[in-house]
Image (spheres, coloured by chain):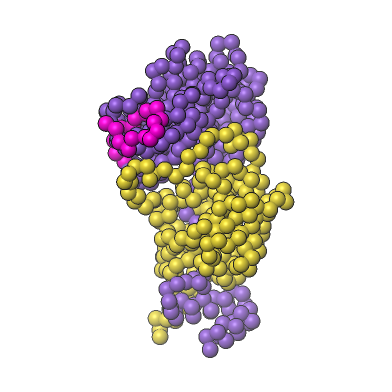
Amino acid sequence: MSSRSTSIVVLALVGLLLLSGCAASADPADGRERGAVQYDPFRSARTDDFVSSTDTLTTVKSAPTQLVVGALGIDMRIDTKALEPNGDMSLPVSPFRAGWYEYAAAPNSPKGATVLAAHVDSLAEGKGPFAELRTVQPGTEVSLVDSAGVTHTYIVSTVERITKGEVPWGRYFSLAGDPRLVLITCGGEYDPGYNGGVGRYTDNYIVTAEKVS
Amino acid sequence: MRNRILAGLGVAALATVGLAAPATALSSTTADIWVVHAVPGVTVDVYINGNLALDGFTPGSVEPLVDVPADNYVVDIVPDATPSADTITPGTGLFGTGAAGVDVAAGVSYTLVAHPSESVDGNPLLLSPFVNDLDPVGAGEASVTVRHTANAPEVNVVVAPSTPVFSGLQNTDEQTGAVAAGTYNLQVQVAAGGAVAIDLPGTVLAAGTHYFIHAFGPAGNPAAYSPIVFTIGDAPAGVPAGSAGLVAENGVNPALFAGGAVLLALLAGAGVLVARRQTVKA
């Protein structure tokens, strides 16, 4: 009983330090690790064969501003985000807003992944809409509205749960390949002792949706 | 804008040829290899260690091979056949690395460009390896790498009409520089005489993005030069997207959830939230 009380106090103190809601990863390099992939034959390393186009050099990115996943009851505003000083992706403080990573693709880009991420929860506001992503089914429709007022439609193809430190981020944040949408949040087990009691989830949930219009 | 591009390039521009030291770590165990087909007029098959890797690879195409284990690879380029052989004897292609192969180190992003040389007829054909400079470019800036892989003499890259960006690029040369993100009227001009070889008005260079631009040609009818482009964005090291443990999948963790409830009371001071939690627990 006394040990439980101690845990509560520690958590509370940590929580007060964490109102902004981000549990940083300890090693900025660990997210760049890629899982071992075997090649037999070598051609399986192919990911995308494309004919270069000057579209790559002439597209002005149109930032997404609204995300709707009707099947999950998600309707969120989107802020434009880049990197934290430690190399992690910067996220809106509130789990009720999503961040668009401006160094990857935009919804109007001819190639590549448009990447949105949001906190799954926060101590101040509780569980956020992205907590529902783990339940999304392939085939679910997702739509984005961009800053030009254009609606872009995507169909979910995969839902992945990957241990932090093993996520091949370069692939998910790729500017190559067919236009697609990648939604990222946290999940899995919660490790309250991580990084000296800062705490974090052990995994990332990553939803990929192919662009259909 | 123009002043900034000049300031940035004057300091940051550098020329490298061939394989240099790793610029940035992508992975501790594997490499990425971007294969670029800049030989006009011939569809090819690409063999790696004698195994068919790219079948029917057309001029102007780019193919990223990801998570390639560090090793020495023999790459052969042969004209496309129908059907293509699954295997050939390594080192016997029309051109390529030769039997000695090319060393690929872990944690490095490479480009292999098949392209003509500068001679009158473009022969011999070359397979030139480059290391992709992926050092993070920072907020508000783009990284531009231009590689001369066309059958053409020495060129300069300018902001039209004549503001130098890169100068003195010869066949198989590359130069890299950081520029302020923005829109530029880029041109590739023949160094001797200033004829415009590639005109790229309204080129958008976005922040946090690395542009790899390969000169290609002459190709098409009428024959002309064009760019083969791929881009790589700065990728984050991680996405820390949760902090409260409210949706943890560890199963029951009384200490954690009791802590979470107390925190909500402490932080939000919201009696409603607390009441709701107690109802759920009850």
Image check: B141 left or right of A9? right
Chain B: its colour in the image is purple
Image check: A205 left or right of B20? right
Q: Nearer the viewer, residue B29 or A5?
A: B29
Residue B129 seen in the current view: no
**What is the quadrant of residue B119 in the picture?**
top left
The residue lying at 58 percent from left, 78 percent from top is B265
Q: Nearer the viewer, residue A118 or B218?
A: B218
Q: Which residues are magenta?
A: B70-89
Estimate the x, y position of residue B275 in percent, counting from the top left: 60, 84
The residue lying at 60 percent from left, 52 percent from top is A212
Q: Residue furthest right?
A: A149
**Chain that appears yellow:** A
Estimate the x, y position of residue A94 in percent, counting from the top left: 61, 64
> How many numbered callouts?
0
Residue B192 seen in the current view: yes
Estimate the x, y position of residue B176 in percent, counting from the top left: 50, 29
* Image: B221 above or below A96: above
* Image: A137 above or below B214: below
Estimate the x, y position of residue B161 in percent, counting from the top left: 66, 20
Q: Is residue A109 magenta?
A: no
**What is the quadrant of residue B96 in the picture?**
top left
Q: Please identify the dominant SS of the magenta region.
A: loop
Q: Nearer the viewer, residue B44 or B115?
A: B44
The residue lying at 63 percent from left, 35 percent from top is A58
Image quarter hosting the N terminus of chain B: top right
Image check: A185 left or right of A106? left
Q: Is residue B81 magenta?
A: yes
